[in-house]
Image (tube, rainbow, N blue to C red):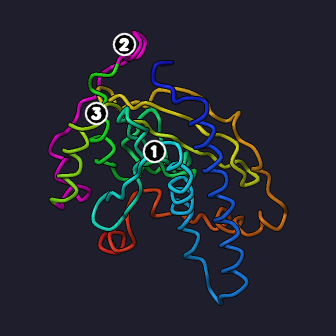
């Protein structure tokens, strides 16, 4: 999978932006906690801070980014890797299942599985001509239920049009994930290439050795610790907005 690695300079930049974005998120949470009577909803903004910081940092190194929608209400950023037309997204590893990347994972002991992320499977079609190793190709191919393409995630014509454009325009589709350890610090960042044939995301590179300055103080940990103790599940991690969540109740 070496041919799908980003340059060390670009990988280092991405990792540093993820770490810095998370730190800015914690500072924002602390400020809101100290200045608002209730501020728990700001727990759902971590992804926005990380993606925004990467958008700021990547422009000087030949990257571009664009806003896209996963469903009716959730907006996220897609990043384009230079002139090579490599598209990539940033995901929280707690909700990412590399063995079934289009199915959201719930990080609890309940064993519950989240809804199908149809847009991730659609974007993975960009890699239909990618070269995976023989061991990757030996994996049993998963059946794709095409009727699910009309699910809530792709009901808007704009969303469907964006997906079709992406599949024809870009050369590769990558997913980068970040993981928080028991001390709520970023301790792992992974680079994957999703295979549309079997719905498995294969490791391209472990970028964790680029992580610097991720250590948190006791005060910073206190800001984010309640999220874990209250089993707060971020709707952003499932690519659904609050309105969609309410509609399902």
Along the viewing direction, whichever of 199 and 176 lies nearer the viewer: 176
Segment colored magenta: 131-156
The quarter of the rendered structure image containing the C terminus is: bottom left
In terms of depth relative to the viewer, which is nearer, 89 or 105? 89
Mark before the other along the chain sequence, 2 or 3: 3
Q: Give the numbered dot on residue 126.
A: 3
Question: What is the number of the mark on residue 63?
Answer: 1
Across and down, in percent, residue 43 comes to: 58, 69
On screen, residue 150 versus residue 66, left or right, reads: left
139 is within the stretch colored magenta: yes
Res 242 quadrant in image? bottom left
Q: Which disc, if any, is residue 138? A: 2
Q: Residue at x 84, y 63 (%)?
A: 218
Q: Secondary structure at mark 1?
A: loop
Spot occupied by residue 182 in the image (x, y as percentages of width and height): 73, 50
Of the numbered discs in the image, which one, if any, rests on residue 84?
Answer: none
Among numbered discs 1 and 3, the one appearing first in the sequence = 1
The mark lying in front, picked from 1 and 2, is: 1
State the SS at label 2.
Answer: loop
If you read the primary sequence from the N terminus, does the residue marked by circle 1 or circle 2 appear first? 1
| Residue under the image location 61 percent in, 34 percent down | 9
- Left/right placement of residue 35 relative to residue 219 reads left
Apparent side of residue 32 relative to residue 84 in the rendered image (left or right): right
Crowding at label 1, few (<14), some or many (≥20) Cα neighbours within 10 Å?
Answer: some
The residues bearing labels 2 and 3 have C-alpha atoms spaced at a distance of 20 Å
The spot of residue 105 in percent (x, y) is: 47, 48
Indicate whether 127 appears above or below 178.
above
Within the image, what quadrant is residue 212 found in? top right
Residue visible at 31% across and 31% down in the picture: 171
Q: Are marks 1 and 3 in contact (CB under 8 Å)?
A: no
């Amino acid at each position: 999978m070496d041919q799908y690695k980003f340059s060390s300079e670009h990988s280092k930049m991405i990792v540093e932006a993820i770490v810095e974005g998370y730190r800015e998120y914690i500072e924002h949470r602390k400020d809101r906690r100290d200045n608002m009577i209730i501020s728990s909803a700001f727990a759902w903004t971590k992804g926005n801070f990380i993606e925004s910081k990467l958008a700021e940092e990547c422009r000087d190194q030949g990257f571009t980014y664009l806003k896209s929608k996963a469903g009716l209400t959730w907006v996220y950023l897609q990043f384009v890797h230079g002139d090579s037309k490599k598209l990539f997204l940033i995901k929280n590893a707690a909700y990412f299942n590399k063995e079934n990347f289009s199915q959201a994972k719930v990080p609890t002991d309940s064993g519950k599985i989240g809804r199908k992320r149809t847009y991730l499977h659609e974007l993975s079609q960009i890699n239909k001509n990618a070269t995976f190793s023989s061991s990757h190709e030996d994996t049993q191919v998963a059946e794709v239920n095409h009727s699910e393409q009309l699910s809530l995630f792709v009901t808007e014509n704009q969303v469907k049009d964006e997906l079709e454009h992406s599949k024809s325009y870009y050369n590769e589709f990558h997913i980068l994930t970040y993981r928080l350890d028991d001390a709520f610090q970023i301790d792992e960042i992974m680079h994957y290439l999703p295979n549309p044939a079997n719905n498995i995301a294969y490791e391209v590179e472990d970028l964790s050795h680029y992580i610097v300055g991720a250590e948190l103080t006791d005060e910073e940990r206190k800001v984010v610790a309640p999220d874990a103790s209250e089993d707060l599940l971020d709707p952003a991690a499932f690519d659904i907005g609050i309105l969609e969540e309410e509609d399902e109740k």
